[in-house]
Image (cartoon, rainbow, N blue to C red):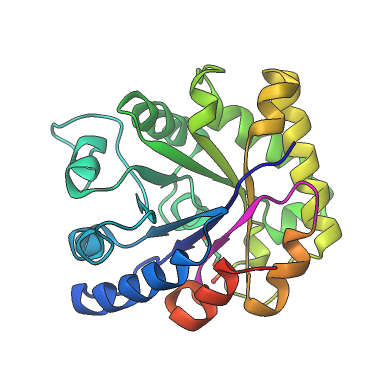
Amino acid sequence: MVRRALIAGNWKMHMTTGQAKALAARVGEAAKQATDRDVLVAPPFTAIPAVAGALAGSEVIIAGQNVCWEEQGAYTGEISPVMLKDLGATAAIVGHSERRQIFGENDDLINRRVTGALGFGLTVVLCVGETLEERESGQTLAVLETQVQGGLEQVSGEDLARIVVAYEPVWAIGTGKTATTEQAQEAHAFIRRLIGKRYEKGLADQMRILYGGSVKPANIDELMAQPDIDGALVGGAALDAESFGRIINFK
Ligand code: 13P
């Protein structure tokens, strides 16, 4: 099964509109050569219009870093799927570990975001991953199972085509510590087996599973050589056009 690779940049809470425009233009250039893979950027909400302008006519996918499930209403501080689409985004990251850890989002809330976003036609990048404490106490696979099952509750096999799972071990995010390729491959294969059991093997084989956590130009090639790693969700290195360009053009 050949899955099309997806390299995604999560800009987190970085980039004013001017900075975002300049970075997006360079990402657009780097993505031009990468015709056999998909590229996605997730700017902060405020920079999406500038990024959409800079990427007009490009194939680069634009995503929100989070999304509400309702079209509109009394949800102070939230952004709806319709609003994201209005700005030119076609995808949203949901359940990032920073949302879970800093803002207290749980699997229930994350699942509402996932189903809402799918319902309005967005693609969803669902993030899962264990903390260092969970890994050290041998709970990694159990945590992944709970987060994958919880996040995908009520999601149909048909809608699964618009789900990308990102495995991001919390201890590898922004720490410079990457999971070893074996650790990442083991987690990815486990997630794919889970999806296969819950849905069917054919759907699991088609699903893209990204690795995230200190992905850099120096480790992307080795990660992408793993059979169940279909792409990367890049934080810090996505803020630098040259590094992200090299990651997009992994070998
Ligand atoms: P870093 O690449 O900075 O470790 O961040 C990973 C991440 O959280 C992407 O969503």
Position of residue 224 relative to residue 190, above or below, is: below
Q: Residue at x 82, y 57 (%)?
A: 183
Say which of 170 and 207 sits in front: 207
Q: Is residue 233 magenta?
A: yes
Quadrant hosting residue 19: bottom left
Instruction: Determine whether, in the image, residue 240 is placed left or right of residue 219.
Output: left
Q: Which residue lies furthest to the left in this view?
A: 73
Q: Quadrant of the C terminus?
A: bottom right
Q: Evaluate whether residue 193 shows in this view.
A: yes
Q: Which residue is drawn at 73% across and 69% down?
A: 221
Instruction: Determine whether, in the image, residue 24 is placed left or right of residue 78.
Output: right
Q: Residue at x 50, y 68 (%)?
A: 235
Q: In which quarter of the image is ligand 1?
A: bottom right
Q: Is residue 15 magenta?
A: no
x and y percentages locating residue 224 in the rendered image: 72, 60
Q: Quadrant of the N terminus?
A: top right
Q: Which range of residues does the magenta coloring cover?
A: 226-235
x and y percentages locating residue 169 in the rendered image: 67, 57
Quadrant hosting residue 13: bottom left
